[in-house]
Each structure stands twice: as C-alpha cells, then as structure tokens.
Image (cartoon, helix red, strand yellow):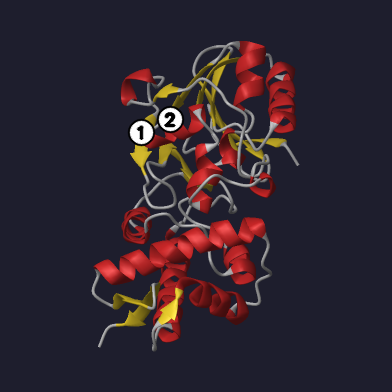
Amino acid sequence: MYELVQVSENAYYVDCPAKIGIVKCGDNQVSLIDSGNDKEAGKKVLRLLEANGWKLKAIYNTHSNADHIGGNQYLQGQTGCEIYAPGIECDFTNHPILEPAFLYGGYPCQDLRHKFLMAKESLAKPLCQAVLPQGLEVLPLPGHFFDMVGFRTADDIVYLADCLSSKETLEKYAIGFIYDIGAYLETLEKVKGMRAKLFVPAHAVPTADILPLAQYNIDKVWEIADCVLEICATPVPFERVLQKLFERYSLRMNFEQYVLVGSTVRSYLSWLKDSGRLHAVFEDNRLLWVRAG
C-alpha cells in the first residue's frame, strides 16, 4: 500500500485506497492529483516525494469527498503548496462540514462528523486551466459529485477520479454513490469514447481500455433504476424504498450507509420523477413515490 507506480515519463500514481496522481512539472517539482483520505496519507505521500527529491508545488483536487482531500491540510501545512478545486468542490474543500451536512440533509450528528465523511479544512482556490502546469488538461466529469473533474497529462495518462467503480466494488455494494444520475450517465458515455495511453480510476485497476468497465457501471445504474421502479409499483415512502434496496442487495445499515446510499436513492427518485417514470404524491402528510402508468 502507498507504492509509487510510474506510468509514463512524467506521470505516476500512489497505489492507495483512493489513488493519488503525481505529475512532474519541472526538474524537481511535482503536482498531486488529490491527497488521500487523512493526515496519515499525507505523511506517507510526503515521504515518497522526499525520497525522490521532489518538491510539492500544488494539489489539484478532482472533487471534495473526504477520501480525496483528507491529506490537503497536512501537506499544505508542511510544504506551503497551493490547492485548487473545481466549482462547488472548492467551497466543500474549504468548508468540509458541508459534505456530511449535504449527505444527511441537516446538521450531521457526531456519528457522521469523522474523517471518512469530513476532512480537515484546507485553503483551496478555484481550479481553472490557467493554474495548471503546461500540458495538464482538465476533464469535466460531473455526476458522482457536483463539479468533479479528471485530468489528462501531456503524455496521455488520464486520471478519472470517481467517475466509475470497480466491478468488484459494485458486485459487493451494488449501489455506488451518485449525486446526479443523469449527469453521471452522460459522463460515463463520454468516458466510453475516450482513448488514452492509460486510464487511472481512483477506485479501480488502471487500464488502457476503459470501455468495458464504463459499460458495466452504466448497466448497474439502469439495474438500480429498474429496482426502484419495481419497489414503487404501489405508493411507498422513501424509507421503504431504501429498506427494500438494502434487503435486495444484502446491505447492512449504519449511519454511513444510511447517508451515502440514502442520498443516492433520493437522486434516483429525483431523476426518475423528472424523466416521467415516477410520480410523487402527498397522502396523510407523507411524501410517497409511485411508478408512472
């Protein structure tokens, strides 16, 4: 774990739970793509940089989930590096309480205010093409989170962040976290058509052919959508939809799963309603969901 893997002349990744990209941008300067899930991840990355005689110039966050920005504070404090994050992700990175608050839909109780859902604060600036080193290109990849991006290097390595999950993860958990279902599907269709020397997803094995995994993720989204529609054959409240999905896929409920899967299921309900396949009705002061037609 935390092994440095070179994938081209100037591009590397750190093999860890949420892969961290490293891009050389000078004789001894490097930039990171994400920073890992906590202070300890930051320490391990810094040791790798120091062992190679590299100075950290900047961290480019793909999005603001805690497992991608958790090392920011430590690395910025130790090196004085700049941190950049795209769009709304920049606000979440500067104010990480927003992640568990968004997921829960209110002030998050203590069970949700921990490093897996709430990183330490860091000082991030808005990401744009102008702040990137020469040859590094921003790739918009919305859907998984608000304004998530990936990056393509000058030597054709593509870092895909969380725009898809490994087959093994989806077989185990079935329901991957998605903020915007429609945007997520559009992103996956775009990724299917991409070509690169190597794709480096944050939570899957790097590959030169991303199409099969992208299609597997697309198929899983439609499978979950069909399950939701089946559950909503008669009017049911959100909690019943969530319960039936947990039963269908043998998932175990806890606070983290409640907010992560729960937020995703709400996104499915919104998407299916906006596309005319679900109706929302109010009965006895309850919001109920029912399949259209």
**Image quarter hosting the N terminus:** top right
Residue at image position (70%, 22%) is: 46
Residue 225 at least partly seen = yes
Q: Position of residue 199 (x, y in %)?
A: 49, 47
- Residue type at numbered disc 1: Gly
- Residue type at numbered disc 2: Cys
**Image quarter hosting the C terminus:** bottom left
- In the picture, measured across the screen, residue 173 lies left or right of residue 160, that is right
The disc placed on residue 90 is 2
Q: Is residue 227 above or below residue 242?
A: below
Residues under labels 2 and 1: Cα distance? Answer: 6 Å
Residue 212 at least partly seen = no
Q: Position of residue 178 (x, y in %)?
A: 45, 57
> Considering the numbered disc 1 on the image, is that residue within a helix, a strand or a loop?
helix
Residue at image position (58%, 11%) is: 80
Contact (Cβ within 8 Å) of mark 2 with mark 1: yes
- In the picture, measured across the screen, residue 29 lies left or right of residue 224, that is right
- Label 1: which residue? 87
